[in-house]
Amino acid sequence: MLLYIIKRICWFIPTIFLVSVLIFFLSKLAPGDPVTLLGLTPDIQRMEHIDIEKMYRQQYQKLGLDKPIFYFTVQSYAFPDTLYKFTNKSKREILIKLINNFGNWTEIAAYQSNIENFIKKININFSKSQIKKLNRSCIDLIYTAKPNKIEEILLQIRQVIQKDSVLNILNSDYKILSKSYHSVINQSTKYKLFIPKISLHGFDNQFHNWISNMLVGDFGYSYTDRRPASDKIKDAIQQSLILNGIAFVLSFGLALFLGIYTAVHRGKKRDKWIMNILYALYALPAFWIGTLLIVFFTTDTYGEWLDLFPTYGLSSRLSNDPSFFIRAWDRIIHLVLPIFCLVYPPLAYLTKQMRESTINILSQEYIKTAKAKGLGNKKIMKKHIFKNAFYPMLTVLGITIPGIVLGSVVIEQIFTISGMGLLIIQSILNSDWLVVFAITWLYAIISLLIKLIIDIAYGLLDPRVNLKSSNI
């Protein structure tokens, strides 16, 4: 048994790692700049805002974005190992395009450096009114990678310098800039793009820091209100645990009872009626049923006697009442409709599995032998049927529980329950990607943990699993 548990844990750890890697890299594809989304919105396009650019760089470094993304990178020989150190995302993307166009990083870096030196010189020696057009052209040059466009901008800069005698002192600097760009073209080494290179970065990288923080519950700060994401998730997860926990217990408990009951009365009218009703409910989308329940049973539109349940949330002002029974009743009536919408979708599937498993057990020879020995139905049910029919249900739970959890995302939105589902939808709408991917990661970890617990429970309850693991 110990060997079986060790094997399951050994599979669990790399699976968590691979899932975490996938979620992390997906988070890197999210739109927007983390520094800007956190509230600092410097105008990086205007070089005169030196203090804001400095603040941006400090925040960028504070978030650890100036570190390599992973433990290693696989890229072409044309790319430098330190491209991640460029703070400005737009500029970094332009550099990547230039490298893909020409392949010679040394000349490209010199070209970009000459542009910045040229901008610094004109800002130092001239007033803003004198260099407004020139400065705009230089900024365009930084964020342009198309050769034809670069040639056009360089020509514009030369014309501006030649037309204004005051700007003539920039001729030598312009020649250096123009020469550096033509070096990029003339010394192109595109062949380097086809030579692979692996660069090792060690443990001081973005992914290592991210997963280390996630494992201790540090999810960073929300982009919308700058609250710790862990606080927002903590508040939401309590609501989701209540909702999903009750839904799981009810759906699983009802499935056990109905599965055994329909199997014992197989072929009879009660069996057919129960299964037909369950299949009919299974065919109805939960979000549609939830909407209908709100329309018919939470308002007096179709009669005052139908206004039986509250429309949204898991509690109301009655939840602050000093009486325990009033508070408990308030919570119950809020839970009825969303719990129903979560319970009925998996109920047909679970009942069918339990029914088929029980029918299979009832046809076994040892059940017939037990009946021949005079054992009562209750003893046979307790000692033989229920125990053996329960094992296949454990495997089914590994699929059903994540389904209930994911289904609650829609139900929480419909009934405005402040759980994880509502939080992730609101975060997506508000582009609060840090919270979105933190919840995604938590959902993935919870699903994997449930699968691990079920596998271990299956091994503890079924001796055949121990036998198989010992033979491997």
Image (cartoon, rainbow, N blue to C red):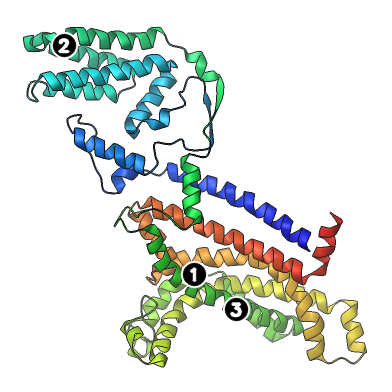
Looking at the picture, tell me which residue is in the foreground, 235 or 302: 235
Disc 3 residue type? Ile
Frontmost residue, 239 versus 269: 239
In the figure, 280 relative to 168: above or below?
Answer: below
Circle nearer the viewer, 3 or 2: 2
| Residue 43 in view, yes or no | no
Q: Which residue is mark 1?
A: 286
Mark 1 neighbour density, 10 Å: few (under 14) some (14–19) many (20 or more):
many
Tell me if label 2 and label 1 are in contact, CB under 8 Å.
no
Q: Which residue is mark 3?
A: 277
Report, in whole angstroms, how far the alpha carbon at label 2 lies from the one at label 1: 70 Å
Few, some or many residues within 10 Å of mark 2 (<14, 14–19, 20+): some
- Residue under pointer 2: 170
Pointers 3 and 2 in contact (C-beta within 8 Å)? no
* Figure quadrant of residue 307: bottom left
Q: Looking at the picture, how far across and down is residue 252, in whole percent?
A: 62, 76
Q: How far is mark 3 from mark 2, CA to CA?
A: 84 Å
Asked where in the image residue 447 lies, by quadrant, the reply is: bottom right
On the picture, is 322 further left or further right than 44?
right
Label 3, residues with CA under 10 Å away: few <14, some 14-19, many ≥20 = few
Closest to the camera, between mark 1 and mark 3, is 1
Lower sequence index among marks 1 and 3: 3
Amino acid of disc 2: Leu
The quadrant the C terminus occupies is: bottom right
- Residue at left offset 20%, top offset 36%: 51
Q: Where is residue 207 shown, x and y percent of the image?
A: 49, 43
Q: Residue at 50% of width from left, 49% of height from top?
A: 211
Residue 83: mark: none
x and y percentages locating residue 215 in the rendered image? 51, 55
Q: Secondary structure at mark 1?
A: helix
Amino acid type, residue under disc 1 in the picture: Ala
Q: Position of residue 268 (x, y in %)?
A: 73, 85
